[in-house]
Image (cartoon, helix red, strand yellow):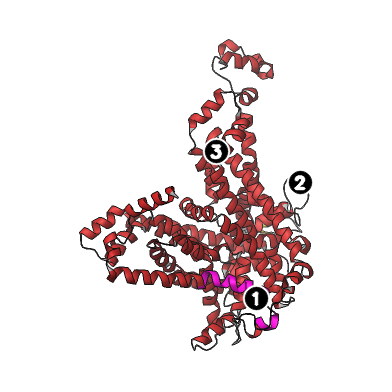
Amino acid sequence: MSARSRAAAEMNTDRSILSFNDWKRPGLAVPTVAVQVVLLLLLIAVGLLPLLWLAKSAITPTQDTLATPMALFPHGIAWSNLSHAWNDVHIGSYFVNTIWVTVGEWAVQLLVATTGGYALAILKPAYAKVVSGLVLATLFVPAVVLLVPLYLTILHPPVLGTSLLNTYWAVWLPAGASAFNVMLVMRFFQGLPADVFEAAETDGAGPFRLFWSVVLPMSKPILGVVSVFAITAAWADFLWPMLVLPNQAIQPLSVRLPAIASQTDLGVYLAALAIASLIPVVIFLFFQRTFLNGGGLGGAVKG
Amino acid sequence: MLTSTELDQQAVPGGAAASRPAAARPRVRRTPLTWVRRGGLAKLVFMLPLLITFGVFSWWPIVRAVVMSFQHTNLVTAPAFVGWDNFVYVFHDPMFLTAVRNTGWFALLALVFGYPLPLVLAVIMSEVKRLKGLYTVLAYLPVVMPPVVSVLLWKFFYDARPAGVFNTILGWVGIPPQPWIQSTAAAMPSLVLQATWAAAGGTIVIYLASLTSVKPELYDAAEVDGAGLWGKVWHVTLPQLRGILFITFILQIIGTAQVFLQPYLFTSGGPVNSTTTILLLVFQYAFQNSLGGNYGAATALSLMLAAFLALLSVLYFRLTERWSD
């Protein structure tokens, strides 16, 4: 509480476009507040209402949604939409597939970004400059360039001798090659105090010990940012899983939802859409700070 | 610390090194063993996940894209080099010009509607004293919706019947029902509208972060010079955001030039190819070809797009560098 009021006091000395005196002038303050209230209502209408509409329609009978989409439950509530979607349309199993895709992509991205960032920023072998240059260079190659050759690599991967098509490795492994993650983690590791590493080394910690017991525990904030990006990106991914997971039984929600649209009852279908958006929205509401600060961070790094 | 001679002795059993007199070479020789002892192996072990994933799934495919654009690849026979044939094929495809025009139209509409909007909203939001967090969360909610879900949801909103969601809302204010994604004229603006809705929150958050770094003294100084509200926005806020505004401008063009999800899910490029974009054409060449994937044409077109965007970015940064001074 006290920290908060202190922060508020500091905020007060930290003015923005309008000064204190501006806020005391009713001619300026009243219209400003009016604009802000209008904006709030607008944001509610544009940002929140579509989600609430989806939640409502997920439990509305199909006939009602078709005839009067903006009415509030004219003929009762159809909870059955949700169970139909989960069981009969197999949204439940596609949901599990999505979680499987997400967890794997998250783990691979975290492994590559932390080990790679550690090697590039702290261990610094002679070839580190070349490698980080090559990693940075991939940021400037649009993803579309990779689409076809990457697909052919999945069909005939080197060394393995067997196609990765229809295996989750086909979505997990390419996700690891994220220059954005590596750069983000590398910059963070570079900012860690070097004397801590020296102290650990004189205490006899080898590179593995240093990584596991010193660097990783100090890096929780950046690992949180990378995790949030990895999870939302994996949940959102559509084109790539559609190409490399042609087997319907293992496809994630994002791929199945457009495919089932035409042969699914509308109410059940909207219930499926609502189920698919639930987890990302809940994760966002829980980890707002990481999302919103990380969003700014993302812009800064991309620049 | 090991001395150099100790290291040499360690290296002696290495065969070739044994024949040389150790005393004649006081400096450290680099042998596999000294490399391991100095932690070279550990460094490489940590580097391996990055080298493997980037090597196999990024660097090699990029090289392969360039090679494939000059080859004829059909997965049955060995790829054959065909010179510029793939590029010529793309140029002669009547869909190429359509796709370029549509992509340009999408990018232009997205700039006109989508570029100023987040800036205006962020500037207003930065002056909010209470519930600022609520504003940000509301603005960001569309960004966290899975893109596929939000496109499919909007596809239903765009229902062209008078009882469609958006047409019902238009009916409240007396506007007749619109065809939305079903007409060649309205389809592209409808796609842009959804794309803007889905992306604006991300840009707003970036602008809000930059707005907090504008020095308050600058506003004080502007007031001393007699600047009003607009004066302060025009002469302080916008110039201070110039750097980030330049970046979001080019990033938005690069992003919209690669639009795929909206045309693919909303309209599949229709009606009458009015929303076929470059990425949709790449996708059709490679994966929706009844004669088997035309991988050469697909990579050729994607490389042309990449080259165009690279050139555009270089020119843009040259230009803005001059303006930034």
Q: Secondary structure at mark 3?
A: helix
What is the span of residues highlighted in magenta in the rendered image? A45-65
Report the residue at 78% width, 48% height from top. A161
Label 3 with label 2: CB-CB less than 8 Å: no
Asked if residue B126 lies left or right of residue B227, the reply is right
Q: Are marks 2 and 1 on the same chain?
A: yes
Three-letter amino acid code of the residue under disc 2:
Leu
Looking at the rendered structure, the kind of residue marked 1 is Ser
Q: Amino acid at mark 3?
A: Met
Q: Quadrant of residue B249?
A: bottom left
Question: Residue A81 at what x, y percent from top left?
Answer: 73, 73
Q: Quadrant of residue A249?
A: bottom right
Report in which chain the residue with disc 1 lies. A
The local crowd at label 3, few if under 14, some if 14 to 19, many if 20 or more residues have their Cα within 10 Å, is: some
Check disc 2 and report the residue beneath it.
A160
Q: Residues within 10 Å of mark 2 (few under 14, many from 20)?
A: few
Measure the C-alpha gap from mark 3 to mark 1. 45 Å
Mark 3 or 1 closer to N-term? 1
Q: Earlier in the sequence, mark 3 or mark 2?
A: 2
Q: Which residue position is annotated with label 3? A: A218
Q: Is residue A2 above or below residue B20?
A: below
Mark in the foreground, 3 or 1: 1
Asked whether A96 or B105 is in front, the reply is A96
Instruction: Tell me residue B50's x, y (percent).
Output: 62, 43
- Determine which of the numbered discs, if any, sits on residue A57 in the image: 1
